[in-house]
Amino acid sequence: MGKMNELSTAIDEMIACGNGLVKAAEALKAFYSSENEPAQEGKPAESMKKEDPEPTAEKSISKEDVRKLLVAKSNADGGAYKPAVKELVRKYSGTGQLSSIPAEKYAEVLAELEGIGNG
């Protein structure tokens, strides 16, 4: 079972890297496609700078961090919260798998996870 978890983690990391490459390619495309007016060259760079802090904040929460917290909550109190945790993952992924949750939703997932069993 340990090998399957390692394989799943490796695949999740590959997906995250691929998603990062797609975002970078889209940002480059947007930057270079907006070369309409040379006088506005500084403006696209400024708009890209505004977008940068948001993804770094999201990237500070890794999939493994989310996985650990989900497992911990799921196992808490003898597994009493397991159904609620599964439902939370389904809500954000549609498939019921952590690998299907977009990285930008990790903060929302963790915020809702904190509410499970605390209210």
Image (tube, rainbow, N blue to C red):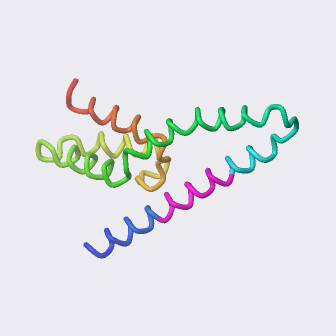
- The quadrant the C terminus occupies is top left
Q: Can you tell which quarter of the image residue 18 is in?
A: bottom right
- The quadrant the N terminus occupies is bottom left
At 11% from the left and 46% from the top, the residue drawn is: 78
Q: Position of residue 2 (x, y in %)?
A: 25, 72
Q: Residue furthest right?
A: 36
Q: Residue furthest bottom?
A: 3
Query: Is 95 positioned to the left or the right of 87 in the image?
Result: right
Give the vertical position of 118 relative to 53 (above or below).
above
Q: Position of residue 39 (x, y in %)?
A: 83, 32
Q: Position of residue 49 (x, y in %)?
A: 59, 36
Q: Give the overall secondary structure of the magenta segment.
A: helix
Highlighted range, magenta? 14-25
Q: Is residue 59 visible?
A: yes
Q: Can you tell which quarter of the image residue 60 is in?
A: top left
At 81% from the left and 45% from the top, the residue drawn is: 33
Which sits in the foreground, 70 or 85? 70
Which sits in the foreground, 64 or 119? 64
Which sits in the foreground, 79 or 7? 7
Q: Residue furthest left?
A: 77
